[in-house]
Amino acid sequence: MNQTKYIFVTGGVTSSLGKGIIAASLAKLLQARGYRTTIQKFDPYINVDPGTLNPYEHGECYVTDDGAETDLDLGHYERFLNVPTSQANNVTTGRVYLSVIEKERRGEFLGKTVQVVPHITNEIKERMQLLGKSGDYDIVITEIGGTVGDIESLPYIESVRQLVWELGENNGIVIHLTLVPYLAAAGELKTKPTQHSVKTLMESGIKADILVCRTEHELSQDLRQKLALFCNVKKEAVIQSIDASTIYDVPNLMLEEGLDKVALKKLDLPEKNTPDLSQWNEFLHKLKNPKHEVNIGLVGKYVELQDSYKSILEAFIHAGAANETKVNVISIHSEYLDAKTAEEQLKDLDGILVAPGFGGRGIEGKIETVRYARENNIPFFGICLGMQMAVIEYSRNILGYADANSTEMNEGTPHPVISIMEEQKNITDKGGTMRLGAWKCHIKENTLAHKIYGKTDILERHRHRYEFNGDYLDALENAGLKASGINPDTGLVEIVELKNHPFFIGVQYHPEYKSTVANPHPLFVSFVAAAVKNKVCC
């Protein structure tokens, strides 16, 4: 292939229609046909990255191997394609403007008046083609955040218009995702919102090549013909995206609709072979035909918005299928959990995961959760802050350090068993100051962690400022809380575990970021297996 091809995915009518899932599903089908495919997300908000966004605002912040704090859609991309993403796969308006302003300050524009067109649009186009110019991909799919008609999305839409024209015929196409709502009173699907959305897109100079229609009901042939006629697309390019029981059904649904075939035809590319989805469908079969069922408590402080823990929830789906087990995740708000309510809220669980997070709110509830799981032999899994809470709980209740805490919650604690990294102490800007991205961990043999991973050296992704305080390592290990994973370069503790417990492990990193359909994360797989065993035996 001489030239990388580009597919742009835009959205209309309303947000949350699933552009990321459609983009990931199409990429999966193209990948299964033998095309080297990647996906990138362009977000219209002015934050430089999602790193400083409250989870209630934008869901979880997803972290890549190279330490980029990105949009949660990149998690979908990795889970579907089983290929790592990077800093280049997620761009925000804030990052675009910051780059342009820095160039202006350096005098790169030679005194010209800096404007949205051409300076901002040129920056966007350059970043849209960055992955394509690497030579690593045949097809680059670009998801444009927001909906057509949003003020903040206009520079991106204009950049797509210019780039499609510059790339030339058959080298760049636009897929427009819209809603075809069902009006119960009228008893029919309505196409007018989609017509208006396409009209708005055309007013910006872009003609949709493919129309993907989110719907609760089947689109009739007459309705498809009407949409094709009024929206100026071929009838075969009107693709139905009906509500599915799981997002992992969508690639098969898009295969049935022929989305990949239409896209390849528009890009003047051969279909190659039939997509091989055998491994994918084996996963789906196990997911839909479980032999066991467990209830696992997810104890966190952002549980009102499920997207706050998106990667964790998806990792449980992968691990559940691997164990042929239906995992019911019970969300429990740590802020409303204490010594009096712990028994009532936690007693019926087969396993407990204490979630990551920042700040002091809900901390005592997490500590109480760890105590309950430890004392009642319930399989326990702590991630990042969850691991730190396990260290604090053990320090308080086993070592007898009643005031043990993290300096994040109490700077004056006499026993700072969790403390900020030395190099972080004088930093005031919050963005990008944490230990981020993939870091090494050496696992000690004859430990639970070694049994789970089956090897001694791993790479896992981090996102945190505070660490296990090495000054307390000997005291904690002598009391039974073992450090089974250590960073070989820094000596920082990465994994803690208890030996005489059915399953008790805490990790400083975020294993959920690396769990995919093809490779469920071993920690989640082992945790779910422990929960199944706990339910059967107890």
Image (tube, helix red, strand yellow):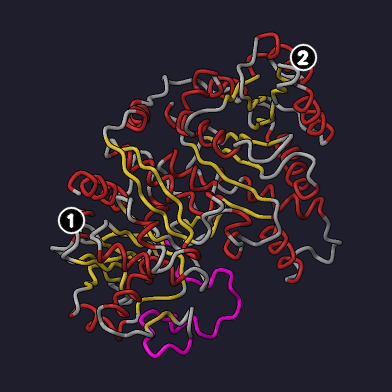
**Total marks in image:** 2
Numbered disc 1: secondary structure: helix
Please tell me whether residue 208 belongs to the stretch shown in magenta.
Answer: no
- Which of disc 1 and disc 2 is earlier in sequence? 2
Q: What segment carries the magenta color? A: 411-439
Q: Work out whether residue 467 can be spotted.
A: yes
Q: Work out whether residue 3 can be spotted.
A: no
Q: Position of residue 300 (x, y in %)?
A: 46, 60
Task: Report the front residue among 296 and 152.
Answer: 296
Residue that lies at the very extreme toward the top in this rendered image: 222
- Say which quarter of the image contains residue 196: top right
- Alpha-carbon neighbours of circle 1 within 10 Å: few (<14), some, or many (≥20)? some
Q: Position of residue 312 (x, y in %)?
A: 42, 51
Q: Position of residue 516 (x, y in %)?
A: 38, 43
Residue that lies at the very extreme toward the left in this rendered image: 446
Q: Which residue is disc 2 drawn over? A: 229
Residue 200 versus residue 479 in the image, above or below: above
Q: Nearer the viewer, mark 2 or mark 1?
A: 1
Task: Report the front residue among 72 and 287.
Answer: 287
Please tell me whether residue 417 belongs to the stretch shown in magenta.
Answer: yes
Numbered disc 2: secondary structure: helix
Residue 451 is tagged as 1
Task: Report the front residue among 277 and 397.
Answer: 397
Q: Position of residue 213 (x, y in %)?
A: 65, 25
In the rendered structure, which amino acid carries the disc numbered 2?
A: Leu
Residue at image position (65%, 32%) is 172
Residue at image position (66%, 31%) is 177
- Alpha-carbon neighbours of circle 2 within 10 Å: few (<14), some, or many (≥20)? few
Cα separation between marks 2 and 1:
60 Å
